Image (cartoon, rainbow, N blue to C red):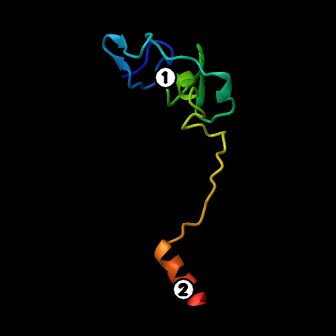
Amino acid sequence: MLCDTVKKGVECAFMSKKGCGFFGGSCSPIVEKCGDCNKIFEYEAGKYCKVYPDPKSKWMNGNCPSASHVKTEIKETQKINPLKASKRANKKK
């Protein structure tokens, strides 16, 4: 249904005939950590996240899972097959 609280005219999963079904009755504005995320949209009432109705809860345990402006470092370690490693060690002897 279309939101009629904060994001007027935007399709919202929490809207029902009774009103907004999200905790508190409406979406929460973005937090400072959201910064330059490309999922932020500005409405008449302020800046809100398009993905999450409460962005503050997504930043409580580290980074937001859909934050486009945060680069995560992935350390790739080469997996070693123990069978092949033992065979290689036996060949060298």
Q: With 64 as the anchor, is 9 left or right in this view?
A: left
Q: Write down the residue under mark 2.
A: 90
Horizontally, is 51 left or right of 2 in the view? right
The residue under label 1 is 53
**Labels 2, 1: front one:** 2
What residue is shown at x 57% (from left), y 82% (from top)?
89
Crowding around mark 1 (Cα neighbors within 10 Å: few <14, some 14 to 19, many 20+) is many
Image coordinates of residue 18 in percent, x first then y, are 32, 10
Name the secondary structure under disc 1.
loop
State whether residue 50 is above or below residue 66.
Answer: above
Nearest the eye: 5 or 68: 68
The vertical placement of 74 against 77, above or below, is above
Q: Residue at x 69, y 29 (%)?
A: 35
Q: Check disc 2 and report its element: helix, strand or loop.
A: helix
Using the image as rendered, state which of residue 72 and residue 85 is in the foreground.
85
Could you tell whether 2 is left or right of 59 in the image? left
Q: Quadrant of residue 36?
A: top right
Residue that protrudes farthest toward the left in the picture: 17
The amino acid type, in three-letter code, at marker 1 is Pro
Q: Which mark is residue 72?
A: none
Q: Position of residue 87 (x, y in %)?
A: 51, 83
State which tag comes first along the sequence, 2 or 1: 1
Question: What is the quadrant of the N terminus in the image?
Answer: top left
Quick check: 90 above or below 57?
Answer: below
Quadrant showing the C terminus: bottom right
Residue 82 vertical position relative to residue 62 in the rendered view, above or below: below
Dividing the picture into quadrants, the one containing residue 22 is top left
Tally the numbered discs: 2
The spot of residue 7 in percent (x, y) is: 50, 19
**Which residue does the image show at 30% across and 13% down from the upper left?**
17
Q: Residue 61's quadrant in the figure? A: top right
